[in-house]
Image: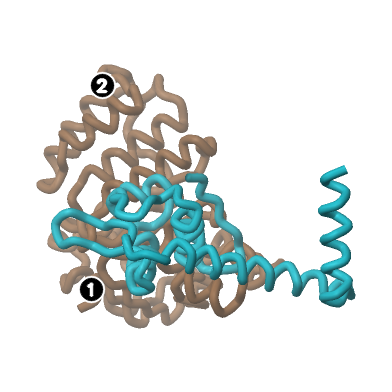
Amino acid sequence: MSLIKCEGLVKKYGNMTALSDFSIEIPEGRIIGILGPNGSGKTTFIKSLCGILRPEAGTIRIDGKEVGIESKKVVSYLPERPYFSSAVRVKDTLDFFEDFYGDFDRKTALHMLSTLQIDLKSKIGSLSKGTREKLQLVLVMSRKAKVYLLDEPMGGVDPAARDFILKTILTNYSEDASVLLSTHLISDVEKVLDDVVFIKRGRLALHKSVDEIRMEEKKSVDTLFREVFAC
Amino acid sequence: MEWKFTDDIPIYQQIMNMLKQEIASGELAPGQKLPSVRELALEAKVNPNTMQKALAELEREGLLYSQRTAGRFVAEQQGIQDGLQEELMMEYVEGFLEKMKKLGYSVDEVIALLQRYEGKGEE
């Protein structure tokens, strides 16, 4: 059984179509890059999987469940923008995750935070943008979920922080879980991906393994992306 | 080991080539234990599935073997190192000759060039 199965998803904003007859199946144990230019529907797809947006048509099954309370128990979602108020402290965010998610492993989170030398007493507002993003990722990856949805996890951080983020993803996902991550930094993530999904104007343009792409096209995913989406 | 990857071929094949080189040069000694898939994947910053695939292929080719609980080891049979060296040597020579042919040199000319180059180095 596929871990994620979507069929015929349609999502419109007014007369703008964000997803159009979008179908995809994703198995367990894969790291998948969701790639596409700005406005192609990546975030809409991710938000549909975690139940923040409701498509007008189509079905979604995650681990066999419809999107709702049961699916949310196994989905760990990192939104594009960090969402904690700048007034709360790092420790409060841990408490928050512990309260909300039964699968949150505080020990893992504490260990990663100490590696990063993030002080539990710091206020979120005092952290740099990069540190805030790292904290958010630490929280999301410290859940023992089955699906990790990471929307632009490396948005505004430096290359060293990107390495940390990739390492965190590699260390923390297990064989029965899958990670979906959307990004524009293809060359940075290519080595860690099993498969890539290209989304073009709300449609699935390509879903292939990185090995296949390199074997068939004799080029990297980054190069192929630039060709497929040339302006 | 330095893990640097190029664009044109699958990453698992590049990992296989790097490990072959290490075995051929003896840097990975016969019988030596390899780190776990996860450790190697983290070190190379690649997907664990990719690393797994590379190691499984090398196992299939008889260059590595696993013991159920103890882990993965470099094969100990005699001649493996020599065989690998030969394989890599052939690969390098073929690649080199192909490039030289594209530049318009015949094999004889290449040999002459190599001798001249070698002579220069000695002077």
Question: Image height check: is A41 above or below A82?
Answer: below
Tell me the SS state at disc 1.
strand
Identify the image's colour scheme: rainbow, by chain, secondary structure or one colour: by chain
The correct choice, above or below, for A228 with respect to A112 in the image is below
Q: Position of residue A48 (x, y in %)?
A: 33, 64
**Eyeballing the image, is A118 above or below A161?**
above
Quadrant of the image occupied by residue B47: bottom left
Residue appearing at x 45%, y 76% in the figure: A207
Q: Position of residue A225 (x, y in %)?
A: 60, 67
Q: Give the camera-side residue of B49 and A164.
A: B49
Q: Colour of chain A?
A: brown
Residue that numbered label 2 is attached to: A120
A55 or A196: nearer the eye? A196
Residue B107 shown left or right of residue B20 in the figure: right
Disc 2 marks a residue whose amino acid type is Leu
Q: Quadrant of the N terminus of chain A?
A: bottom left
Q: In which chain is the residue bearing label 1? A: A
Q: Disc 2: which chain?
A: A
Question: Measured along the vertical axis of the image, is residue A117 above or below residue B47?
Answer: above
* Rendered shade, chain B: cyan
Residue that appears at 34% across and 41% down:
A137
Question: Residue A186 is drawn in which quadrant?
Answer: bottom right
- What crowding class fits label 2: few (fewer than 14 Cα within 10 Å), some (14-19), or many (20 or more)? some
Comparing labels 2 and 1, the label whose residue is closer to the camera: 2
Nearer to me, B81 or A159:
B81
Residue A62 picture location, percent across and down = 22, 69
Question: According to the image, label 1 marks what residue?
Answer: A61
Whether residue B49 can be seen here: no
Label 2 and label 1: CA atoms lie apart by: 37 Å
For residue B106, side relative to residue A90 (left or right)? right
Looking at marks 2 and 1 on the same chain, the residue that comes earlier in the sequence is marked by 1
The answer to the question of whether label 2 and label 1 lie on touching residues, with beta carbons closer than 8 A, is no
